[in-house]
């Protein structure tokens, strides 16, 4: 096999990474747009009601696409799927409770600390730690620290932080659940 015939490892050129990056970008837009629309429902449903509606609609869509009743779930792997589903539900609930109290952008920034922390736990490169410090500095610049009208609701910050911990944790349990069930794992937990 010549050098030109060898497979190119993912991430070494722009091509193999373009699709995953596009999916992440689309997911980010959908998440923020969905949260913005759901926030309009808060006067009628409240934070918990909006979260419940989102979880219900997601479960219906996932069930229609993946038909989870066909998945083979046994005692050996039901724990990971159950924890994955519980973390996903708790993440959505605490996220919606947070955006009911603090601005959406700040909520997302605080919540992002969860997956960012997970990424740092798996990294050993100095450059990765520098990026984390820059992300934390950016978060600190976004956050109104002066008490008064612009100050953040402390309970909203706690809800956002819990959502972040759930996000990081559901990534771990999602990998475990999907190892056994693939993409159907997200529908089984619904």
Image (cartoon, rainbow, N blue to C red):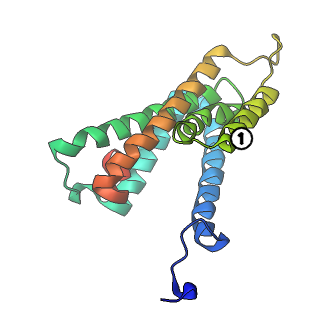
Residue 142 lies, in percent from the top left, at 80, 30
For residue 147, which quarter of the picture? Answer: top right
- Would you say 110 lies left or right of 149 here? left
The residue lying at 57 percent from left, 23 percent from top is: 159
- Tell me where residue 78 appears, x and y as whole percent: 23, 42
Residue sitting at x 53%, y 37%: 118
Check disc 1: other Cα within 10 Å, few if <14, some if 14-19, many if 20+: few
Q: Residue furthest left?
A: 75
Query: Residue sitting at 65 percent across and 36 percent down?
Result: 108
On the question of residue 45 being in view, the answer is no
69 is higher (above) or lower (below) than 132: below
Considering the numbered disc 1 on the image, is that residue within a helix, a strand or a loop? helix
Q: Residue furthest front?
A: 2
Residue in front for this viewpoint, 73 or 134: 134
Depth check: give the residue in front, 56 or 91: 91
Between 62 and 10, the one nearer to me in the picture: 10
Residue 152: image quadrant is top right
Q: Locate residue 142 relative to residue 132 in the image: left or right.
A: right
Tell me residue 74's x, y (percent). Answer: 16, 47
Among the 4 quarters of the image, the one containing residue 37? top right
* Residue 11 position (above or below residue 60): below
Query: Is residue 65 in view from this perspective?
Result: yes
For the C terminus, the image quarter is top left
Q: Position of residue 65 (x, y in %)?
A: 38, 62
Residue located beneath label 1 in the image:
131
Which residue lies most toward the top here?
147
């Amino acid at each position: 096999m010549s050098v030109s015939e060898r497979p190119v490892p993912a991430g070494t050129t722009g091509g193999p990474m373009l699709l995953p990056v596009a999916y992440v970008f689309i997911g980010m837009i959908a998440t923020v747009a969905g949260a913005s629309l759901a926030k309009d429902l808060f006067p009628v449903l409240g934070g918990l009601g909006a979260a419940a509606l989102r979880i219900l609609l997601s479960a219906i869509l996932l069930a229609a696409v993946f038909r989870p009743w066909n998945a083979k779930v046994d005692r050996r792997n039901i724990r990971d799927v159950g924890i994955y589903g519980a973390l996903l539900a708790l993440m959505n609930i605490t996220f919606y409770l947070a955006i009911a109290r603090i601005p959406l952008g700040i909520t997302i920034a605080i919540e992002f600390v969860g997956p960012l922390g997970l990424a740092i736990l798996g990294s050993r490169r100095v450059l990765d730690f520098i990026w984390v410090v820059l992300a934390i500095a950016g978060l600190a610049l976004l956050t109104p620290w002066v008490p008064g009208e612009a100050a953040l609701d402390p309970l909203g910050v706690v809800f956002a932080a819990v959502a972040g911990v759930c996000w990081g944790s559901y990534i771990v349990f999602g990998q475990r659940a999907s190892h056994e069930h693939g993409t159907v794992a997200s529908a089984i937990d619904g």
